[in-house]
Image: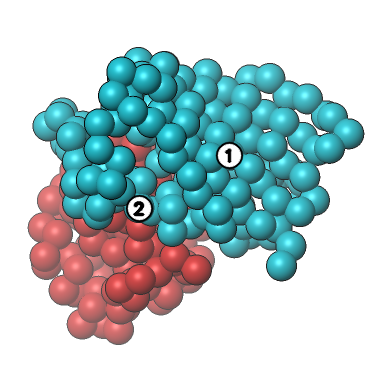
Chain colours: A red, B cyan
Amino acid sequence: MKVKEIKRLLEADCLIGEQYLDEEVDMAFGCDLMSDVLAFTSGRTILLTGLTNPQVIRTAEMLDIRVIVFVRGKKPGKEVLDLAVENNIILLTTKNIMYTACGILYENGLEGVPIRGVE
Amino acid sequence: MNKDNGINGIKLQYEIIKDDFSRAGEASSNIKKVLRQLGIEDSIIRRTAIVTYEAEMNIVIHSEGGRIKVLINPDQVQIIAEDYGPGIENIELAMQEGYSTAPNRVRELGFGAGMGLPNMKRCSDEFEIQSEKGAATIVTMIIYIKG
């Protein structure tokens, strides 16, 4: 699914990375536990989270996650935005809560990461 | 960061500061960039990035500070994460998924779920942890580049 389609479905705003919205992702992970994200993510994954601290961007960087959606209208501070720019990461923010945002994407064909994802 | 180009490969070393959450991840980020510059395969880079980041977070969260050393040669990436204590009382317990001694402020950052050490082991081809109460913890991991 193209990132711009995700943006449309979630009625999201793009905070960083407008120029990359034509990129594709294959699956999604909705989680506030970065420890779990590090343990289970594989492939071209989008991360949905309610956390907005720098560790979210660092976690995405380590896993080559290119897209992060902040749920419930959250917006990170400048330090986090700058870190995303530095790492070419796309940041979206949606007013939907985590459950609804994940449900909308799943309903439209974007599946979750497999249970044991690390290759 | 110290960087040596020895005969046997490249050696990187980073000091990690206790409780420095704003810079946590910088060392792992730099290590990942070096591996990419060397043209190492993506899956190897990713596994190395995961274990160095988990190790770096562990040092920031649980220790008195420490360092991460990375030795890269054509056959393997070796990562040594060592801290200045206070040591792990029960390593077997620490290696169990879900076991954690992390304080709440760490959990609020999305860490401290008791997944770090098991994940480091899973992503490594060789994994060894040495520790005891009141002493340094040394985690040594090897990720094979070939075969």
Left or right of residue B22, residue B74 in this image: right
Q: In which quarter of the image is the C terminus of chain B?
A: bottom right
Q: Which chain letter matches label 2?
A: B
- Residue at 23% over, 46% down: B93
Please provide percent x and percent y for residue A19: 52, 54
Q: Distance between the residues labelled 1 and 2?
A: 16 Å
For the residue carrying disc 2, how many other residues have a C-alpha within 10 Å: few (<14), some (14-19), or many (20+)?
A: some
Q: Quadrant of the N terminus of chain B?
A: top right
N-terminal of the pair, mark 1 or mark 2, is: 1
Q: Is residue B83 above or below residue A106?
A: above
Mark 1 lies on residue: B79
Image quarter of residue A114 = bottom left
Nearer to me, A99 or A119 = A119
Please say whether residue B14 is visible from this viewpoint: yes
Label drawn at residue A24: none
Left or right of residue B131, residue B112 in this image: left
- Residue at 63% over, 42% down: B78
Image quarter of residue B23 = top left
Please say whether residue B46 is visible from this viewpoint: no
Q: Which three-letter amino acid code belongs to the residue tagged 1?
A: Ile
Please provide percent x and percent y for residue B120: 43, 49
Q: Which three-letter amino acid code belongs to the residue tagged 2?
A: Pro
Dot 2 falls on a residue whose secondary structure is helix
Please provide percent x and percent y for residue B142: 60, 49
- Residue at 18% over, 65% down: A101
- Residue at 43% over, 59% down: B122
Nearer to me, A32 or B102 = B102
Dot 1 falls on a residue whose secondary structure is strand
Nearer to me, B58 or B21 = B58
Label drawn at residue B118: 2
Please provide percent x and percent y for residue B112: 23, 40
